[in-house]
Image (cartoon, helix red, strand yellow):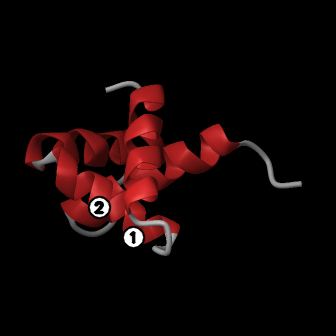
Amino acid sequence: MTDEELLVEFALARLDHPDVDLDEVAAIVVRRMGPDRAVEFASRTLAARGELRGALFPAAVEHVLRVVLTMRGPAD
């Protein structure tokens, strides 16, 4: 899955849950994607950090948040 596709999935989840925090929306995205994608996302966190901190699910959520915040650009 590309970063752009992940961003679209995040945006769709955000539309479904507009009052939810970004980290909770990222968790929803990981749940929707299923266990195979969660492993893929966690492995990308491992590659980016050089280590895997904590369990698989939080690492997958961290990757989704990293992608969303990176694609969002710098804060003004």
Residue under numbered circle 2:
28
Q: Are marks 2 and 1 in contact (CB under 8 Å)?
A: yes
**Which amino acid type is shown beneath numbered disc 1?**
Glu
Residue 22 is left or right of residue 16, and the answer is: right
Instruction: For mark 2, give the secondary structure.
Output: helix
Instruction: For mark 1, give the secondary structure.
Output: helix
Residue 69 is left or right of residue 57, and the answer is: right
Residue 54 is left or right of residue 3, and the answer is: left
Residue in the image at 54% along x and 46% along y: 68
State the mark number for residue 12. Answer: none
State the mark number for residue 24. Answer: 1
User: In the displayed image of the protein, which residue is found farthest to the right?
Assistant: 76
Residue in the image at 48% along x and 55% along y: 65
The answer to whether residue 70 of the structure is visible from this angle is yes
User: Where does the image place residue 48, in percent across and percent down from the top left?
Assistant: 46, 42
**Which amino acid type is shown beneath numbered disc 2?**
Ile
User: Where does the image place residue 3, in percent across and percent down from the top left?
Assistant: 45, 30
Q: Quadrant of the C terminus?
A: bottom right
